[in-house]
Amino acid sequence: MQQAEGSTFVANISKPIKWVIPDTIRTDHATHLIVQQQGSEFLLFFFETKTILFTGTPEEQIAAYQNLPELEAKCVAKIVMGVENTMLAVNNFIESVNRFNMMIQETKGQENATPSPQASANLSTTSSQV
């Protein structure tokens, strides 16, 4: 009984996280995202559409593209997250996109404009414990 109480106590002690991204991690580009929910978990599937090289005249390239029965999208990552962590990730993502949009609005219509230091600072990485 004491062991269970001790492990519960240790689990409630907050510690900083050292974020480690290995040099060998692969970076893929995703063009599509499919989200599925199973019980209390969300599955996130990231896909990249296959690039097809067409040759010939522009008209021949359009005809070749129109004759394709389908485009292929390869799954480049699958991530499973609990509902609580998914909510944190979604909120952080929305906040980051909103900060980016605000920065774009500040510079909209200004040729060769550089974002204000405030807008640049707003693009900083947002992280949460997920």
Image (cartoon, rainbow, N blue to C red):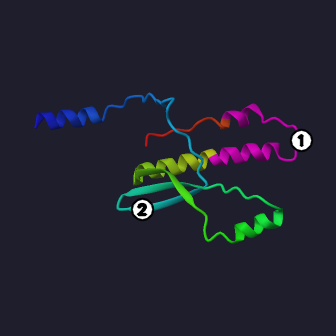
User: Tag 1, which secondary structure?
Assistant: loop
Q: Residues within 10 Å of mark 1 (few under 14, many from 20)?
A: few
Q: Which residue is mark 2?
A: 37
Q: How many marks?
A: 2
Could you tell me the amino acid type at mark 2? Gln
Q: Position of residue 70 (x, y in %)?
A: 60, 68
**Front residue (pair 13, 125):** 125
Q: Residue at x 71, y 48 (%)?
A: 101
Check the image and name the residue furthest to the front: 56
Could you tell me the amino acid type at mark 1? Glu
Q: Residues within 10 Å of mark 2 (few under 14, many from 20)?
A: few
**Front residue (pair 60, 101):** 60
Labelled pair 2, 1 in contact (Cβ < 8 Å): no
Q: Looking at the image, is mark 2 or mark 1 earlier in the sequence?
A: 2
* The magenta segment: 97-121
Q: Residue at x 67, y 57 (%)?
A: 52
